[in-house]
Amino acid sequence: MELPGQPVVAKTVTPDFGYGIGKALSGGTREDSILGDPNHKGYLIRSYYYNAREKVYKNVAKNLFVGAGLSFEIRRKINLGDTTNNATPSSVYDNRHGFPKDRYSANGFLFNVEYITRDNPNRAYKGIFFDAGVRINQKWIGSTKNSVQVTTDFRKYFSLSPSNPEMVLAFWNWGSYLVSGDIPYLELPGTGRDGTYRSGRGYTSQYFKGTQFNDTELELRFPILANKFLSGVAFGNLQTGNDEHGTKVFQVFQPGYGAGLRVLFNKRTRTNLALDYAYGRFGRKGFFLNLNETF
């Protein structure tokens, strides 16, 4: 099985709300309070973004796949909105970790193992999906810094009714952990930084972030109409991560929750449209639109 890469070339405006999981800071320097502001003041980061990724999986046993590939994340003409040194979280992070403020490259090798028994990739009623991966960024292929990251993605689906298999309790846990080296600020794992960019509903992408990050989600799915054209969901999530003030992953958790509708397009493929409204802390809330289930 091969997953084709989709090259990206974009001029981006990225909202940034600081580093960490939102734990209140006592003491520390001015730069500490900017990097890990518990009130999550917003900043804008402008840049040109280039991405190319290619990964190939091979079926080596029943339901078991191994994969390998390459990924290139490149940003140029980064504007941090920092008119004075150490005025924004990204500026503080770049200074501490030795990254240029106006550009970076995060180029690496990808190695993954997958085990899949779910009955449908678009809208599973039962089974599991598990993926574990290692990313190795290397200077000799153009990366600004060397680093090693480990990722895990586990999903389990429970059908709650023999007569209505669409009534499902779905569980998802995604994590990313820096083992060694340094990664650029905009490549830190965090909210919405899973492989499908859908985790942490209730917050914008990378609202929370750290070098160690984990997100857990639970969703109840149920039919509304007898013909299954319209269904509903209720969901909640918990995010946790580290910061540079001593907080470790799994010590502090931030919640998100909400509900939504599903509009079925095709019964055979179970393709649907997902419309969710979610709430988080710090006044965060928003509408989230996806093709097919969030996970």
Image: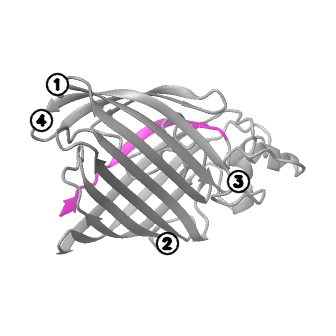
Say few, some or many: other residues with alpha carbon within 10 Å of mark 4 (under 14 / 14 to 19 / 20 or more): few
Magenta residues, start to end: 1-17
Asked if residue 182 lies left or right of residue 76, the reply is: right
Q: Residues within 10 Å of mark 1 (few under 14, many from 20)?
A: few
How dense is the environment of label 2, judged by Cα within 10 Å: few (below 14), some, or many (20 and up)? Answer: some
Q: Quadrant of residue 52?
A: bottom left
Image coordinates for residue 161, horizontal then vertical, percent: 23, 42
Residue 62 % position (x, y): 17, 72
Q: Earlier in the sequence, mark 3 or mark 1?
A: 3
Q: Is 158 in front, or is 197?
A: 158
Residue labelled with disc 4: 267
Seen in the image, is 239 located left or right of residue 173? right
**Marker disc for residue 138:** 2
Residue 198 seen from this side: no
Instruction: Name the disc covering residue 93, or none.
Output: 3
Give the spatial CA distance, label 4 vs label 2. 45 Å
- Three-letter amino acid code at the position of disc 4: Lys
Describe the element under mark 4 as helix, strand or loop.
loop
Three-letter amino acid code of the residue under disc 2: Gln
